[in-house]
Image: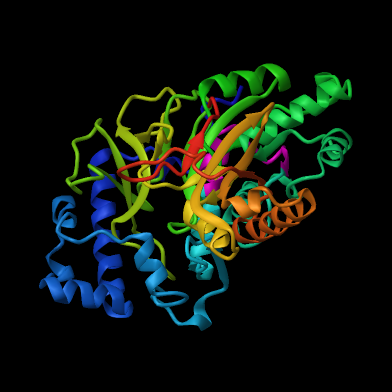
């Protein structure tokens, strides 16, 4: 096992003193560039009387307000860019809660940085130039497929951009092309294992030896299940579209915390209710500041992901700070099959139809290895007692509109009036029954 292979020893194993000095230099450069070129940051800092030149320490960074997803939406599509569109060579986006996505841009240097940080986490996960990497993430505006693709190519591995779906073909390619590394969501890896067993495809017919999984929460129990059924080493990785995509952090083969690329991203943990920065080791919301990104620098971006940061002497030799697996979200967003879903997206669709009440519930379950989404919708009595053909037609139209809105198929079930529980405070729109 190449447990101690490191892609960039100078960056991943530097002393804390050297790393913190590099962070400050890059932070000051980023703040000055954002202030000069991004109207949003200039107006915000001027309004508070903050001079970017005054930010000389990590503690000074705390004077600057947070950037949120709402800020990105308010400046849709290109208002957060710090360079002209002529210098932007790639545009990705994530789904939005109100129909508008958050748009992210990359310069050529940004794409090179992206490839570098992904090469680090893939190397940490066991990938080498001798590997054949099968990427079963969807390609397109989603950053996952492309980010991991170019990171693998940076290492020198052979990449199969098979994209998502068509499981039987995935397994045929895996066997015939002698795939050694699988990249996908952990739930899809579980589904692949189930289909292998159903079709009596023995593990020794495959060349798989490791897998890099992300884009959705998963547990140690699921890791053990994947490793037992496929015979691979499974590692976790973390990223988010707004900050870069995959490559923010990833596990080494010790599988004890994710190494966070601090020379590119300055992390903080805050109390999500007060915004107060918490001491190292305490759990809270992850906040990230980009310090090497050109096209779209983000200052103190609230990820809404709950985790904690800590330092340890990892046997792999990396000195970068570690983050625990994300334990949850501070908002109502749920992740299903790597797709971000917000209740408000569903709500907007439901409001398009007459005869529906404003009461609904999204139930997420796990059927075998795959996640399923069921949406319970209360209807008025005239709809509920209508003939079955009309009910089926209504369900089909709602289902189709929801699929277009969230990018995922969901089962819609009409229920009687007063069936769903009422809440005096915030309504519980999501019931997540997955055992992750």
Against 429, residue 254 (above or below) is above
- Residue closest to the eye, 82 or 46: 46
Q: Does residue 208 appear left or right of residue 61 in this picture? A: right
User: In the image, is residue 390 above or below residue 203?
Assistant: below
Q: Position of residue 95 (x, y in %)?
A: 54, 60
* Observer able to see residue 4: yes
The residue sitting at 15% across, 69% down in the picture is 53
Where residue 257 sits in the image (x, y, percent)? 42, 29
Count of marks overlaid on the render: 0
Please tell me which residue lies in front, 252 or 211.
Answer: 211
Quadrant of the image occupied by residue 45:
bottom left
Magenta span of residues = 118-134
Asked whether residue 369 is drawn in magenta, I would say no
In the picture, which quadrant includes the N terminus? Answer: top right
Residue 174 position in % (x across, y down): 82, 36
Would you identify the image quadrant in which residue 3 lies? top right
Residue ID at (68%, 54%) = 399
Judge whether residue 150 can be spotted in this image: no
Q: Is 122 included in the stretch rendered in magenta?
A: yes
The residue lying at 57 percent from left, 61 percent from top is 349
In-front residue for pair 146/80:
80
User: In front: 74, or 125?
Assistant: 74
Q: Residue at x 51, y 66 (%)?
A: 101
Judging from the image, the colouring scheme is rainbow
- 250 in relation to 247, above or below: above
Picture coordinates of residue 305 (x, y %)? Answer: 38, 43
């Amino acid at each position: 096992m190449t447990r101690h292979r490191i892609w960039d020893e100078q960056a991943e194993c530097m002393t804390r003193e050297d790393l913190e000095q590099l962070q400050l230099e890059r932070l000051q450069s980023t703040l000055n560039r954002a202030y000069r070129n991004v109207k949003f940051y200039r107006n915000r800092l001027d309004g508070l009387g903050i001079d970017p030149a005054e930010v000389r320490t990590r503690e000074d960074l705390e004077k600057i307000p947070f950037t949120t997803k709402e800020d990105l939406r308010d400046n849709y599509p290109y208002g957060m860019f710090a360079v002209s569109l002529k210098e932007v060579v790639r545009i990705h986006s994530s789904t939005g809660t109100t129909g508008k996505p958050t748009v992210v841009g990359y310069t050529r240097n940004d794409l090179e940085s992206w490839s570098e940080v992904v090469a680090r986490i893939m190397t940490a996960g066991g990938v080498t130039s001798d590997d054949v990497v099968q990427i079963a993430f969807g390609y397109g505006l989603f950053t996952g497929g492309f980010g991991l693709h170019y990171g693998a190519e940076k290492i020198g591995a052979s990449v199969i951009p098979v994209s998502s779906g068509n499981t039987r073909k995935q397994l045929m390619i895996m066997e015939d092309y002698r795939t050694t590394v699988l990249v996908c969501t952990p739930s899809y890896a579980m589904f692949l294992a189930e289909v292998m067993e159903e079709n009596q495809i023995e593990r020794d017919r495959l060349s798989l030896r490791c897998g890099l999984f992300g884009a959705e929460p998963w547990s140690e129990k699921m890791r053990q299940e994947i490793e037992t059924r496929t015979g691979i080493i499974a590692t976790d990785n973390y990223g988010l579209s707004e900050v870069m995509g995959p490559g923010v952090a990833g596990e080494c083969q010790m599988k004890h915390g994710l190494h966070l690329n601090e020379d590119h991203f300055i992390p903080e943990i805050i109390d999500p209710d007060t915004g107060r920065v918490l001491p190292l080791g305490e759990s809270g919301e992850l906040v990230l500041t980009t310090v090497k990104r050109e096209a779209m620098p983000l200052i103190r971006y609230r990820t809404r992901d709950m985790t904690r940061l800590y330092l340890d002497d990892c046997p792999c030799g990396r000195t970068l700070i570690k983050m625990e697996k994300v334990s949850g979200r501070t908002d109502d967003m749920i992740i299903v099959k790597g797709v971000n879903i917000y209740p408000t997206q569903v709500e907007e669709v439901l409001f398009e139809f007459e005869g529906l009440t404003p009461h609904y519930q999204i139930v997420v379950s796990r059927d075998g290895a795959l996640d399923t989404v069921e949406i319970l919708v209360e209807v008025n009595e005239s709809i509920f007692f209508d003939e079955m053909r009309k009910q089926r037609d209504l369900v089909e139209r709602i289902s189709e509109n929801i699929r277009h809105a969230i990018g995922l198929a969901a089962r819609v079930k009409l229920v009687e009036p007063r069936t769903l529980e009422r809440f005096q405070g915030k309504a519980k729109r999501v019931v997540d029954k997955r055992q992750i």
